[in-house]
Image: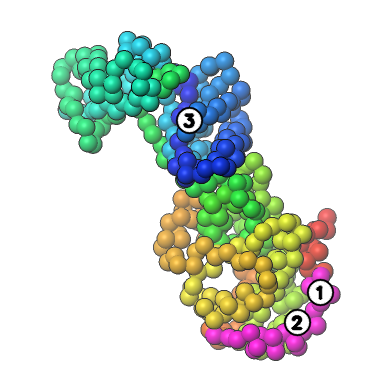
Amino acid sequence: MTPRIDAILCRYCEIALKKGNRSMFERCLAENLRAILAEIPDLLVPRTRGRMWLKKKGGACFSSDEVELVVNRLPKAFGLASFSPGVNSEKKIETMVEAAAAISQAVFERELDAKKHPTFRIRARRSDKNFAMNSKEVEIALATALSERFDKEERLRVNLELADITVSCEIREESAFLFTETFQGPGGLPTGSNSHVLALLSGGIDSPVACSMLMKRGCRVDFITFHSYPYTTEKSVDKVRRIVEVLNEYQPRRPGKLFICNLAPLQKIIRDSCSERFRTILYRRYMFRIAEAVARRNRSGALLTGEAVGQVASQTIANLAVIDNAVPMLVLRPLTGLDKEEIIKTAKRLKTFEISIERAPDSCTVFAPKSPATTSTIQQLEKEEAKLFVDELFEELTNDAFFPSK
């Protein structure tokens, strides 16, 4: 008996807490689901009382390849708490037994082959209170029928707490839905339900993780990266492009744009005119200024960085305050309190880690000071910047980032 998957039940948590604008979040999630599963033809995303469904036009079943695509893609759909592929059934216990047997046969056979006494349980939920049987009665009826069908040697054991096999049944007004697997989604809010932001994206480990955290809060993320050609190679920009491709898998409906800026001309002037110990902080202040100018033209609501307090000399509290002072725009730093192991763990889950650890020179390391300042003041940095006459160059770098030459 081959299981016929004709629906995927999609659950959300945080969206359910929304009140007057809940439907906006639901619509946004539905649009993201359609985009992330664009290869599946005739896909429908109906909504019913706190649930969303993936179904095919005319009630057609999903192919095994389509189910595999769903299982691989939906963990990238921010806003989704969990999802379960399964089968709809008429609300008659006899039909529900046949549907439960079809969806679970392969699972029972696998566990009976692998273990002497596999355990199982039935989980029933009845939202249609007019259904003749209560949840407990449904569980007993399904458990009895499945045990008789699959356990001729009476090897199965019931375990209601932690079972090898769980067959679940939801009895809703329109139908019963039966399934054996539940997959975790990433949670949060659907990407695109909040303002979009511009991320300062390096080729390192941290900034891609910061981008994912803001996507999870509903923000669509665009990106700006800085290189220092000819002191850095094309490889550093190529790394960032590949990281952007991975991150855009989480926002397929409106993929983020990548802006690219060559900071080397400005860095040479800073090297020749300013105190060595403040170089990195000066680089960062001008990066923020260029990023803010691009963000305003791009109608982005905030800047986003992967900085974490104390990780490097430029990320002390004193230096972060001085860097922030360079721009009036809101700067978001979601990694502020995380340690490196937490960041690496998330980067591996995102599939950006292996790209990030490829060796390539970083623009902030060009002309890097031997002894960088760990504390600085706004007055000190403004005094250093007074030595620079870079207004025209700043405008040129900003324009080149926003309107790249062909």
The residue at the far front in this view is: 20
**Few, some or many residues within 10 Å of mark 3 (<14, 14–19, 20+):** few
* Quarter assignment of residue 150: top left
Q: Can residue 381 be seen in this snapshot?
A: yes
Q: SS class of the residue under badge 2?
A: helix
* Quarter assignment of residue 375: bottom right
Residue 170, position as x, y percentages in the image: 37, 25
Q: SS class of the residue under badge 3?
A: loop
Task: Judge left or right: residue 238 versus residue 80.
Answer: right
Residue 367, position as x, y percentages in the image: 65, 80
Quarter that holds the N terminus: top left
Over which residues does the magenta segment extend? 375-395
The three-letter code of the residue at mark 3 reads Arg
Q: CA distance from mark 2 to mark 1?
A: 10 Å
Residue closer to the observer: 140 or 222? 140
Residue contact between numbered discs 2 and 1, judged by CB atoms under 8 Å? yes
Q: Residue at 54% across / 52% down in the picture? A: 217
Residue on which the image places disc 2: 269
When the figure is inspected, residue 149 is found, relative to residue 231, above or below; the finding is above
